[in-house]
Image (spheres, rainbow, N blue to C red):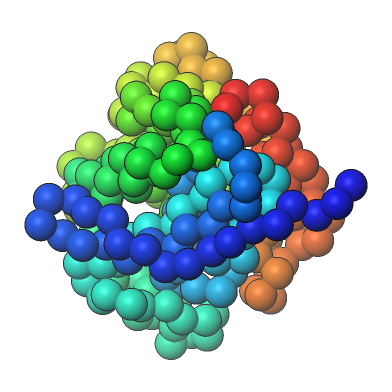
C-alpha cells in the first residue's frame, strides 16, 4: 500500500476572544474524512504530539492538536526532564475544565470548517494530562469515539477543582477506550477499576486495556518509559476504534 501523502502546519482557532495555536495535519487530495482532536501531555504540543497528529492523518483523518496551555504559556513545548515535568505540572494546575472543553469545541468547530471533514464524524485521543482531558472531551455531544491514554486523576479530581471528572461519565454519548500501564504509580489499579465500574453503571460503550509491565507514558517513543510492545498493540486498537466509530 502506498503511503498516504499528508500536509501539516500551525493554525489559529478561536474560542471567544482567545486565539489558540493548533497543529493541523491532513491527507492531501481526499474528501469527506473524519476528524480527530489530539490532546497533549503536560509538555505542550511538542514533537511527540505533532508526530502523533501526523500519524493519525496518515491513517485518513484530519487531525488537530490545540495548545491546551494557551492561556498559561502561549507557544509552550518542552521535553521530558525533571525540570520540564515541574513546569508542565505548574501550567496544568492552572487549567480549568470548562475552559478546556471550550477550547476543544473550538477545535471541533475548526475541523468542521475544513472542506474534507465529515461534520458528524469526530473523535479524540489524549495522553497523560490529555488522557484525562479526553475523558472530559468525551462528554461533548460531537465526540463519537475517544481514546484516553493513562489519564491520571479521573476518579479523584477535575482541572480547576469541583467534582471529579468521573462524575461526568453519564454525559458520555460515544464510545471510549482507555489504556493504562499496570506499572503506572500515578494511576492505582483501584482507580482504573473505579472508572470501569462507573462506565458499566452508566452503560457507556467502552473498553479498558491494561498492559503488564507498562509504565506511565508507555506510548511515547521519546520517553524512558516507552514500551514498544504495549504501544504497538494500543495503536492497533486505536485504529480499530476510529475505523469502527468514525
Residue farthest front in this picture: 29
Left or right: 168, with 84 as reference point: left
Out of 2 and 80, give the one closest to the viewer. 2
Residue farthest right in this picture: 1
* Residue 22, x across and y down, in percent: 38, 62
Q: Say whether residue 215 is visible.
A: no
Q: How many marks?
A: 0
Task: Name the residue at 63% across, 33% down.
Answer: 242
Task: Name the residue at 62% across, 42% down.
Answer: 30
Task: Using the rendered view, name the quadrant where residue 54 is placed.
Answer: bottom right
Vertical arrangement, residue 168 with respect to residue 69, above or below: above
Vertical arrangement, residue 121 with respect to residue 42, above or below: above
Q: Say whether residue 117 is visible.
A: yes
Out of 176 and 67, give the one closest to the viewer. 67
* Quarter placement of the C terminus: top right
* Residue 12, x across and y down, in percent: 30, 62
Residue farthest left in this picture: 17
* Residue 222, x across and y down, in percent: 66, 75
Left or right: 122, with 17 as reference point: right
Task: Name the residue at 28% across, 56% down.
Answer: 13
Out of 121 and 173, give the one closest to the viewer. 121
Out of 134 and 2, give the one closest to the viewer. 2
Task: Using the rendered view, name the quadrant where residue 156 is placed.
Answer: top left
Task: Name the residue at 41% across, 19% down.
Answer: 173
* Residue 57, x across and y down, in percent: 62, 51
Task: Using the rendered view, name the quadrant where residue 66 is placed.
Answer: bottom left
Vertical arrangement, residue 161 with respect to residue 171, above or below: below
Amino acid at each position: 500500500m502506498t503511503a498516504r501523502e499528508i500536509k501539516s502546519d500551525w493554525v489559529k482557532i478561536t474560542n471567544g476572544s482567545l486565539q489558540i495555536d493548533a497543529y493541523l495535519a491532513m491527507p492531501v487530495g481526499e474528501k469527506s474524512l473524519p476528524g480527530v482532536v489530539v490532546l497533549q501531555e503536560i509538555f505542550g504540543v511538542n514533537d511527540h504530539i505533532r508526530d502523533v497528529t501526523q500519524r493519525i492523518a496518515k491513517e485518513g483523518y484530519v487531525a488537530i492538536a490545540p495548545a491546551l496551555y494557551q492561556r498559561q504559556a502561549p507557544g509552550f513545548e518542552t521535553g521530558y526532564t525533571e525540570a520540564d515535568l515541574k513546569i508542565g505540572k505548574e501550567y496544568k494546575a492552572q487549567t480549568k475544565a470548562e475552559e478546556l472543553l471550550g477550547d476543544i469545541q473550538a477545535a471541533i468547530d475548526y475541523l468542521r470548517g475544513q472542506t474534507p471533514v465529515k461534520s458528524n464524524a469526530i473523535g479524540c485521543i489524549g495522553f497523560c494530562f490529555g488522557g484525562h482531558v479526553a475523558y472530559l472531551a468525551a462528554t461533548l455531544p460531537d465526540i463519537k469515539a475517544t481514546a484516553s491514554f493513562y489519564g491520571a486523576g479521573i476518579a479523584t479530581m477535575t482541572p480547576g477543582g469541583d467534582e471529579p471528572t468521573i462524575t461526568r461519565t453519564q454525559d458520555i454519548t460515544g464510545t471510549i477506550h482507555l489504556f493504562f500501564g499496570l506499572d503506572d504509580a500515578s494511576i492505582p489499579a483501584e482507580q482504573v477499576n473505579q472508572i470501569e465500574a462507573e462506565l458499566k453503571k452508566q452503560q457507556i460503550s467502552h473498553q479498558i486495556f491494561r498492559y503488564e509491565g507498562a509504565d506511565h507514558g508507555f506510548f511515547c517513543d521519546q520517553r524512558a518509559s516507552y514500551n514498544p510492545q504495549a504501544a504497538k498493540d494500543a495503536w492497533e486498537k486505536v485504529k480499530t476504534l476510529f475505523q469502527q466509530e468514525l
